[in-house]
Amino acid sequence: MQRFLVSIAAVAITAVVVVGLLQARGYAPPTDPSAVPSLAEQRRALAGAPAPLAALHARGGRLERGGLEAELRRLRGHPVVVTKWASWCGPCKAEFPAFAQALTRVGQRVAFVGVNAMDSSADARRFLSDNPLAIPHFEDVDAEVTTRLGLGQNFPVTAFFDARGELVQIHRGGYATRDDLLADVRRHLGV
């Protein structure tokens, strides 16, 4: 009987720890799918953006081989939000709706780009097909570039670069809501 009680206690403690970690990392259940703008709705909301951002949006939904650092240099003059994700990352999938919603709100003034790290191209493409964002995504299979940028090995990670191209903030963990993400965009980028 005592063994049984110890086993039950161990399971209960493990469950509490897991729930606590998920909450601390910003995990939230997926947003209502009807509230997530489609790729076409995102593109309509982004119409009329300045030329550099319009060029970025035109490549929306694509997975590109490398080029993240060059893209960040091209985007100088605009604040940039970089989301690092992987197809196997549950919190990454959970935060994509918040990014789609935030993009439609501030994507004409703020550049958004994605970076897919430590993932396979096929899995990443499937993920983007199911979770479209009207931004380009750059492959970083071995996380070499994201490590150089200081984004570490965590997933998801969001980095905020000011208009000078300086990294001003790193947010580790997912965003539960659009408003949480937009609050950080305002706080760190002034938009």
Image (cartoon, grey):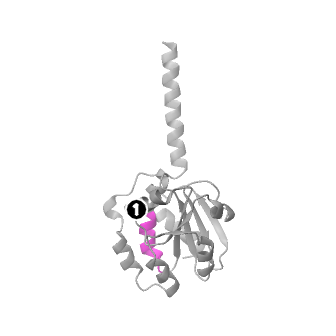
The residue positioned 65% from the left and 61% from the top of the image is 144
- Residue at 40% x, 54% y: name it: 30
Question: Does residue 191 appear to the left or right of 35 in the view shown?
Answer: right
Q: Is residue 119 above or below residue 164?
A: above
Locate residue 124, reporting x and y percent.
Answer: 47, 59
Whether residue 46 is situated above or below residue 27 in the rendered picture: below
Q: Is residue 36 in view?
A: yes
Q: For residue 187, which quarter of the picture?
A: bottom right
Assign the C terminus to one quadrant of the image.
bottom right
Question: Can residue 95 be seen in this snapshot?
Answer: no
- Residue at the far left in the pictured view: 34
Q: Amino acid at mark 1?
A: Asn
- Residue 161 lies left or right of residue 111; in this view the side is right
Find residue 20 and report its horizontal and vertical position in percent.
Answer: 53, 42
Q: With 116 as the anchor, is 94 left or right in this view?
A: left
Q: Is 99 part of what is drawn in magenta? A: yes
Q: Which residues are magenta?
A: 97-108
Q: Which residue is mark 1?
A: 131
